[in-house]
């Protein structure tokens, strides 16, 4: 193994270069040779740290997932009330998306969008090892708020709604800046966004709790009449 292969920053340089190359060319079009050229590393370094191209690609998702989990864990323990866990989840996600270099975030957005549009051979591994655990965490939070199993469609749909709000700030920042040119960019008002996304999400989730009532509310055939309960957003 050459000194270049195991230099302290070689792995990080390969990851940064891989993000650049895969953002520009996609998984299929990106080459290990191009990545190594930009990272000023030899081919052996990729095999040493990542095994192969697929391992290098999945390591990008692993890095993002791990940073998100670590950021979330800093705010509160997993045993906290679900309302507080939901807020920590949203805060960690928005900070991970909106902090840091805009070019880096744009490159990650490009990789994610390309993977969703044209799934690579690595997607099953990426989901199982690096995405599922964070998704399961969100499902557990929503399930506790609704007192329902995580397989309940209300839980699944509500969790998707939370994720959709977060991902808008990840994927649609060029649109946001053009649709709202007079507003500060999202990265300059993270605390405000966290509060609003949390309150909106929590209110919507709690409104999904069905309340059987005798009030004169029309009911469709075969269904019990229901009211949407009032929602009291807990303080924090």
Image (cartoon, rainbow, N blue to C red):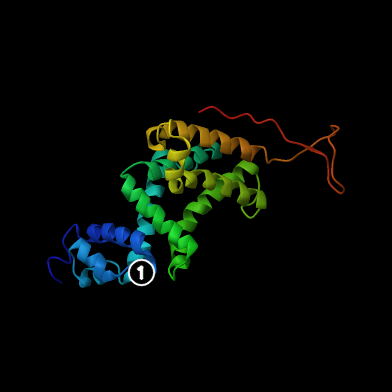
Q: Label 1: how many residues lie within 10 Å, few (<14), some (14-19) or many (20+)?
A: few
Q: What is the quadrant of residue 185 in the picture?
A: top left
Would you say 165 lies left or right of 143 here?
A: left
- Depicted 198 relative to depicted 54: above or below: above
Would you say 95 lies left or right of 43 here?
A: right
Residue at 13% in and 70% down: 2
Q: Which residue is mark 1?
A: 29
- Depicted 25 relative to depicted 103: above or below: below
Residue at 52% in and 36% down: 198
Secondary element at image label 1: helix
Q: Nearer the viewer, residue 28 or 63?
A: 28
Q: Position of residue 32 (x, y in %)?
A: 28, 70
Regarding residue 88, the answer to whether it shows in the image is no
Q: Residue furthest left?
A: 3
Q: Nearer the viewer, residue 168 or 141?
A: 168
Q: Position of residue 25 (x, y in %)?
A: 35, 64
Q: Position of residue 137 (x, y in %)?
A: 51, 50
Would you say 3 lies left or right of 39 here?
A: left
Q: Nearer the viewer, residue 74 or 61?
A: 61
Regarding residue 176, the answer to whether it shows in the image is yes
Q: Residue furthest top?
A: 235
Q: Nearer the viewer, residue 230 or 191?
A: 191
Badge count: 1
Q: What is the quadrant of residue 122 in the picture?
A: bottom left
Quadrant where the N terminus sits is: bottom left
Q: Position of residue 141 (x, y in %)?
A: 55, 45
Residue at 73% in and 35% down: 228
């Amino acid at each position: 193994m050459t000194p270049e292969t195991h230099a302290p920053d070689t792995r990080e340089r390969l990851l940064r270069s891989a993000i650049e190359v895969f953002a520009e060319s996609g998984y299929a079009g990106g080459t290990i040779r191009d990545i190594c050229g930009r990272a000023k590393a030899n081919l052996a370094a990729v095999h040493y740290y990542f095994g192969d191209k697929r391992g290098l690609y999945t390591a990008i998702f692993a890095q993002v997932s791990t940073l998100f989990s670590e950021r979330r864990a800093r705010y509160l323990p997993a045993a906290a009330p679900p309302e507080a866990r939901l807020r920590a989840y949203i805060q960690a996600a928005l900070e991970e998306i909106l902090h840091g270099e805009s070019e880096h975030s744009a490159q990650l957005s490009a990789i994610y969008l390309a993977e969703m549009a044209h799934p690579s051979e690595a997607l099953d591994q990426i989901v199982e090892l690096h995405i599922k655990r964070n998704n399961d965490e969100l499902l557990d939070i929503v399930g506790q708020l609704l007192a329902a199993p995580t397989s309940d469609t209300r839980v699944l749909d509500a969790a998707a709604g939370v994720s959709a709000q977060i991902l808008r700030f990840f994927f649609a920042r060029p649109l946001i800046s053009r649709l709202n040119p007079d507003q500060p960019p999202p990265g300059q008002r993270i605390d405000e966004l966290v509060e609003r996304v949390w309150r909106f999400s929590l209110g919507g989730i709690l409104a999904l709790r069905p309340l059987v009532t005798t009030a004169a509310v029309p009911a469709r055939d075969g269904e019990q009449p229901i009211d949407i309960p009032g929602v009291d957003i807990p303080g924090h």
